[in-house]
Image: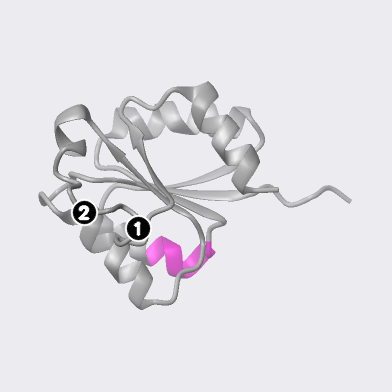
Amino acid sequence: MSKRKPVILYVEDDQDFLDGMKLVLEGSGYEMVPALSAEEGLRKYKQRTPDLIIVDLMMEEVDAGTSFVKELKALGNTKPIYMVSSVGDALTLSADYRELGLAGVLQKPVDPPTLLGLLKSKLK
């Protein structure tokens, strides 16, 4: 019997980023659940209970990523959440990311070896 693949929920409104991340994650033995909006991400979170969540900071609304994280916190989420941000967006995270309920912030575009190393350490 094979071991269950860890499930990663990736919430991102840019289809190209979703497609690229899917290649990286699924090619490395993870299952990726994509969501094109925070609203869709919440639905899929409730359906799949992912092992780790990656969310873009700026999506359909400027603060969609942080609002999504707050919603997950309200739902009692205990899984690690990583926010993906471009250089300019990272500056808007003036508050400590842990206060937002994040395990960390990743720079966009995400470096695949860095991401895979992180996932390996978090999803043992």
Give the CA separation, mark 2 to mark 1. 23 Å
Q: Which residue is drawn at 89% across and 51% down?
A: 1
Say if the magenta span includes residue 80. no
Residue lying at the far right of the rendered structure: 1
Q: Can residue 39 be seen in this view?
A: no
Q: Residues within 10 Å of mark 2 (few under 14, many from 20)?
A: few
Q: Which residue is drawn at 30% across and 34% down?
A: 15
SS at mark 1?
helix
Say if the magenta span includes residue 48. yes
The numbered disc on residue 92 is: none
Side of 31 relative to 29 (left or right)? left
Q: How crowded is mark 1: few (under 14 residues within 10 Å), some or many (20 or more)?
A: many
Residue at image mark 1 = 41
Q: In which quarter of the image is residue 91?
A: top left
Region rendered in magenta:
43-49
Instruction: Measuring from the top left, give residue 123's x and y in whole percent.
Output: 64, 48
Instruction: Measuring from the top left, give residue 84's x and y in whole percent.
Output: 32, 39
Q: Which amino acid type is shown beneath numbered disc 1?
A: Gly
Front in this rendered view, residue 59 or 19 = 59
Residues at discs 2 and 1 in contact (Cβ within 8 Å):
no
Side of 18 relative to 93 (left or right)? right
Q: In which quarter of the image is residue 116?
A: top right
Of callouts 2 and 1, the N-terminal one: 1
Q: Is residue 88 visible?
A: yes
Of marks 2 and 1, the one in the foreground: 2
SS at mark 2?
loop
Instruction: Measuring from the top left, give residue 42's x and y in whole percent.
Output: 35, 64
Side of 116 relative to 94 (left or right)? right
The numbered disc on residue 95 is: 2
